[in-house]
Amino acid sequence: MTSDEQLVRAAIEAARRADATADIPIGAVVTGPDGTVLAAACNAREALGDPTAHAEILALRAAATRLGDGWRLTGCTLAVTVEPCTMCAGALVLARVARVVFGAWEPKTGAVGSLWDVVRDRRLTHRPEVVGGVLEAECAALLDEFFADRR
């Protein structure tokens, strides 16, 4: 198993915690430059009544607090079960995340290569490395199961 697969597996575990809150099961993990897990989170929009409470945003906030370098996450990696949306892609660029690793592609709202490619826009001052499709089937299955139960 590659380290990227391990990171996405950790994000899958975080996503499973969303079951308790009835949120869409998306999970995110942020690791420091040395590989230490700084934060993990799942979607909490329903639980918090907050439209910005995506797993990525919550994990980035917690990692920034733990790392103690203000808002900069230089050298860090964000792993997430689903391709980030525009809000999350913008946030990870502004936080100076070095790498983004994700599982399932999101053709309807993805902003890391599917619908848009915010993170590699040459007009921005920071462009992280992107690795997509890691454990894609497992990550997509989380969403398929969630929505099948609600239809």
Image: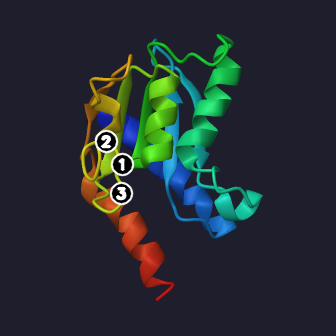
Q: Which residue is mark 1?
A: 83
Residue 105: quadrant of the picture = bottom left
User: Disc 2 or disc 3, which is closer to the eye?
Assistant: 2
State whether residue 32 is above or below residue 23: above
Q: Secondary structure at mark 2?
A: loop
Look at the image and name its color scheme.
rainbow
Residue type at mark 3: give it.
Cys
Compare residues 10 and 78 and report the one nearer the observer: 78
Quadrant location, the N terminus: top left
Residue type at mark 1: give it.
Glu
Q: Which residue is mark 2?
A: 112
State whether residue 142 is above or below residue 133: below
Compare residues 113 and 98 and report the one nearer the observer: 113
Residue drawn at point x = 32 percent, y = 57 percent: 106
Residue type at mark 2: give it.
Val
User: Which of marks 3 and 2 precedes in the sequence?
Assistant: 2
Spot the residue most to the right.
48
The CA span between labels 2 and 3 is 16 Å
Residue drawn at point x = 42 percent, y = 37 percent: 79
How far from the left and from the top, in percent, is residue 66? 68, 20
- Give the side of residue 142 with respect to residue 73, left or right: left
Residue drawn at point x = 25 percent, y = 51 percent: 114
The circle drawn on residue 139 is: 3
- Give the side of residue 20 with respect to residue 73, left or right: right
How far from the left and from the top, in percent, is residue 30? 51, 30
Spot the residue most to the front.
123
How far from the left and from the top, in percent, is residue 121? 29, 30
Spot the residue most to the bottom.
151
Are the two marked residues, 2 and 1, in contact with CB atoms closer than 8 angstroms?
yes
Q: Secondary structure at mark 1?
A: loop
User: Which of marks 1 and 3 precedes in the sequence?
Assistant: 1
State whether residue 79 is above or below residue 104: above
